Image: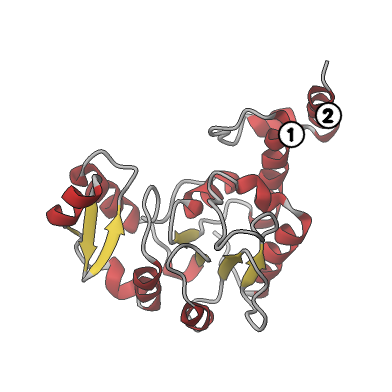
Amino acid sequence: MTWSRKFCLWGYRHLSFLESVKKIKLRHVTHPIIQVKQIRLARRFKSSLGSTQLSFISSNCLGGRFSELQGVPYASPTVGLYFEPSDFMAFCEDLPHYLSQEVSHDAEKSQTLGFPVGDLGGLKIMFQHFPNFEDAKGKWDERVQRVNLNNVVVLFGTSEGFLAEHVRRFDALPVSRKLLFTHVPLEGSPNSVLVAGYEKESRVGDLYSDFYRLGQARVVRSIFRILSEAKIQRT
């Protein structure tokens, strides 16, 4: 038996992980140590946030991962898609307005990119994980109805196209709970969360796939410090 297998079995036996496995989605994860990290992270999410319905508004699929870790249904339309950084900033700066707008099909851009693209009051939504615009719009409209503007958490990252001005705009968002995941320290930004492992990159990586990096002790402390500093309306 390999050491990683022994470690996995030890974690299940001594930390009661088997029960947790039944309650969370282990998507695209096969490495036993990464599975343990995901389970432990999910336990922290559940113990800290309970079943409170939070609306994770994210620039990419990461918000969906947060809902999965918490073990609650998606309460945000930003699942299976992404925004360019500037469009995401504009979206978050006036959520009530944009969430009330009808998303339309940008057929020309969809043809160019090879996946559905929506237009939301001039902002572009890249529905890259949907087979067609009709399915994408259906899910968007359905999940918009679940958004609780009193319990919004905004998730952003230093992705391609991210500019220095986005840090200032992000910190100024009219939302009390917001997390900016970065690959380098951002001095003076109280909402930034440094994720180790991307120091040699030009941006933070895909945290939906590399979500286990969120289990780093420093990252976990930063996430729940920021979330705890703002009042969450318990449901």
Amino acid type, residue under disc 1 in the picture? Ile
- Depth check: 196 or 94 in front? 196
Amino acid type, residue under disc 2 in the picture? Phe
Residue lying at 53% horizontally and 51% vertically, measured from the top left:
206
How many callouts does the rendering have? 2
204 sits left or right of 10 in the view = left
Residue lying at 26% horizontally and 54% vertically, measured from the top left:
141
- The mark that comes first in sequence, 2 or 1, is 2
Label 2 sits on a secondary structure element that is helix
- Quadrant in the picture for the C terminus: bottom right
Marks 2 and 1, how far apart in space?
7 Å
Residue lying at 63% horizontally and 52% vertically, measured from the top left:
50
Please give the label number shown on residue 7.
Answer: 2
Looking at the picture, how far across and down is residue 107, in whole percent? Answer: 13, 53
Looking at the picture, how far across and down is residue 37, in whole percent? Answer: 72, 41
60 sits left or right of 20 in the view = left
74 sits left or right of 129 in the view = right
Which of the 4 image quadrants contains residue 145? bottom left
Looking at the picture, how far across and down is residue 221, in whole percent? Answer: 75, 62
86 sits left or right of 181 in the view = left
Please give the label number shown on residue 98.
Answer: none
Q: Is residue 227 visible?
A: no
**Given contact means CB atoms under 8 Å apart, are the residues at marks 2 and 1 in contact?**
yes
Label 1 sits on a secondary structure element that is helix
- Depth check: 141 or 159 in front? 159
Which residue carries the number 1 mark? Answer: 33
Q: Is residue 16 above or below residue 156?
A: above
**In the displayed image of the protein, which residue is found farthest to the top?**
1
